[in-house]
Amino acid sequence: MTTRYLLLLLLAVPLMPAQAQPFTAADPTRIALYPQQNDLRNTLSLSGIWQFKKDSLAVGEKEGWQNGLTEARSIAVPGSWNEQFTDSRDYLGVVWYQKETYVPSAWRGQRIFIRVGSANYAAKLWINGKPVGIHEGGNLPFTFEIGSLVNWGGSNRITVQVENILKPSRVPTGNVPGSPFTNFPKSNYDFFPFAGLHRDVWLYSLPAVASIKDITVKTNFTGTTGSVEVAVATEGKASRGTIVITGQGKRYEAPIRLTANAATATISIPDVRLWAPEDPYLYQVDVTIGDGKTLLDHYTLETGVRTITTTNKQLLLNGKPILLKGFGKHEDFPIFGRGTAQPVIVKDFSLMKWVGANSFRTSHYPYDEEFMRMADREGFLVIDEIPAVGLYFHGDTNDLAQRQAMCKQYLNELITRDKNHPSVIMWCVVNEPFPREVSVTGGPGGREATPQSIALFNELFALVKQKDNTRLATLVGVMGGPMEWIGLADVICINRYYGWYTHAGDLAGAAKLLAIEADAIHKRFNKPIIYTEFGADTYPGMHAEDPEMFTEEFQTNYLKMYLDFAQSRDYIAGMHVWAFTDFKTGQGIIRFGGMNYKGVFTRDRKPKAAAHYLRSRWLKKATL
């Protein structure tokens, strides 16, 4: 037996259903409503210090580690294990997390759930040593009902096995033969493959007799009258309910009758206050259900009344043209890695507002739910993206089928989770898909869109429109990629690095190439164009009398060239600088210190000269 074959067997172990234990796949419909504390529902955060143990030989499940960890060490949740330990930066194999907790006795008689905000990449869950469920795919939550396994009056052991092994069959991809990325670890994308429990873990309870399972809010307006359609899905024996919308000191109410655990009502709001970046006004939607005599459950969320449409040249928010000014960014911070850090969320929005931005893309995965709620409150427009980065359409057909299935799962989970955020104006189904032999430097390569790839993208766009017909759908095209792919989208979104990866340092030549290409794209598709990435690596504090690559002066001139070009074309609807901050990458010869330095802020959020330039430009409201 060859060494390579033995290695493949070891890598396959975490995905095998060891001992055929009855694990259940997570149900995406359970993540629609974030856990909420009120008089009928309860929440208990399990974030904090957990026990942690690496399992490099993937023997823990066979040896019964789910029944208790020995020789474990402490780890913070949320957080990436790669940043917390000096011996685990590049480790992506199997690990175990464990936490002991009591379930409050007052919850007895209610339905008990656990919700894991994000486990990268694949997870298995046990409660008190009993198998509960599995979930594949990071950056989105999963939930399981665990009431039958709770030890009332005693401590409960919660155990999560996590692994982030890079594979061609996964989304995002890794260890891809012939990949244009030559980094270590061998991800097929240009950011670090952080691993761990990255977001909050919650226990929560729901009323046992009946509960609200999902709420879907769709908004519109005619003249000065707003329209809010609220669809409610329930579980249990409730027969009726009420939807109440409050805002601007007024209250609007509609009764509902539940048929087959579902009901829909539309409420009109006179003199509606529309949600927009300059006035992100949020109405409160409160849904209650009962049996006619008793209140059984209620849930409250916020919504903004707004519409998003396009012409052949513009994005229209509430029927008026709007220019997207902002960034691609990452959930990335020293020590936390990709783990949620609430002060960093607040700081990022403060800096984006300081610089004059009004939008961002969740590159290249869904962000924490608190980030999305902040976008609602702060008035930011969001292109919400699944982790479909580094995809390709040649090679093993089984890998391709698995990746397509994962993309559909991600879209299903993302739209279920984020469909009520007024900040979300667009769903992105993929970032920079690769045709065969494409050159990331813009050099010659295969540029044809195969019928197979077009069919797969059409499947994803159809799924988006089926689940949400109120928002736009897009994909983000790579330099050198097929025009046929980007033409499938409602809005043309492209990443371009002329003047950096090609025509290096030659900004005049890059500007000419931008103009020729953009005019041709718009003529062909007659749709608005957004540049979702453009940028230049800039080492903080590096200067030159005559601007040259890697200096702060060159970055400023580079961004100015792109923005001046965009200002000259009325069909360019937005410009997202790559990137908001410097961020961690794998090791490679083009990534000094394992960092991408294209940020206009440093990784710890200090401004470079380009940030001051953008502030001086973008605070002039009408300009890109």
Image: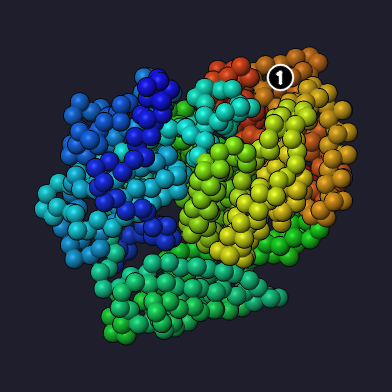
Q: Position of residue 405 (x, y in %)?
A: 51, 50
Residue pictured at 41% horizontal, 29% vertical: 8
> In this figure, what is the number of numbered marks?
1
Does 85 appear above or below 250?
above
- The answer to which image quadrant residue 109 occupies is bottom left
Residue pictured at 71% horizontal, 19% vertical: 551
Q: Quadrant of the N terminus?
A: top left
Q: Residue lying at the far top in this picture: please name it.
A: 545
Residue pictured at 71% horizontal, 16% vertical: 543
Mark 1 residue element: loop
Query: Which colouring convention does the figure follow?
Result: rainbow
Q: Amino acid at mark 1?
A: Thr
Along the line of sight, the residue nearer the viewer: 57 or 285: 57
Q: Position of residue 335 (x, y in %)?
A: 42, 28
Q: Position of residue 140 (x, y in %)?
A: 45, 48
Along the line of sight, the residue nearer the viewer: 360 or 495: 495
Characterize the local packing of mark 1: few (<14), some (14-19) or many (20 or more) Cα atoms within 10 angstroms.
many
* Residue 505 visible from this viewpoint: yes
Residue pictured at 48% horizontal, 34% vertical: 167
- The answer to which image quadrant residue 567 occupies is top right
Q: Residue lying at the far left in this picture: please name it.
A: 153
* Residue 573 visible from this viewpoint: no
Does 250 appear above or below 312?
below
Q: Residue lying at the far front in this picture: please name it.
A: 1
| 571 relative position to 481: left or right | right
Along the line of sight, the residue nearer the viewer: 249 or 398: 398
Along the line of sight, the residue nearer the viewer: 250 or 113: 113
Q: Quadrant of the C terminus?
A: top right
- Which residue bears the numbered disc 1? 551
Q: Position of residue 286 (x, y in %)?
A: 43, 71
Does 439 appear above or below 452?
above
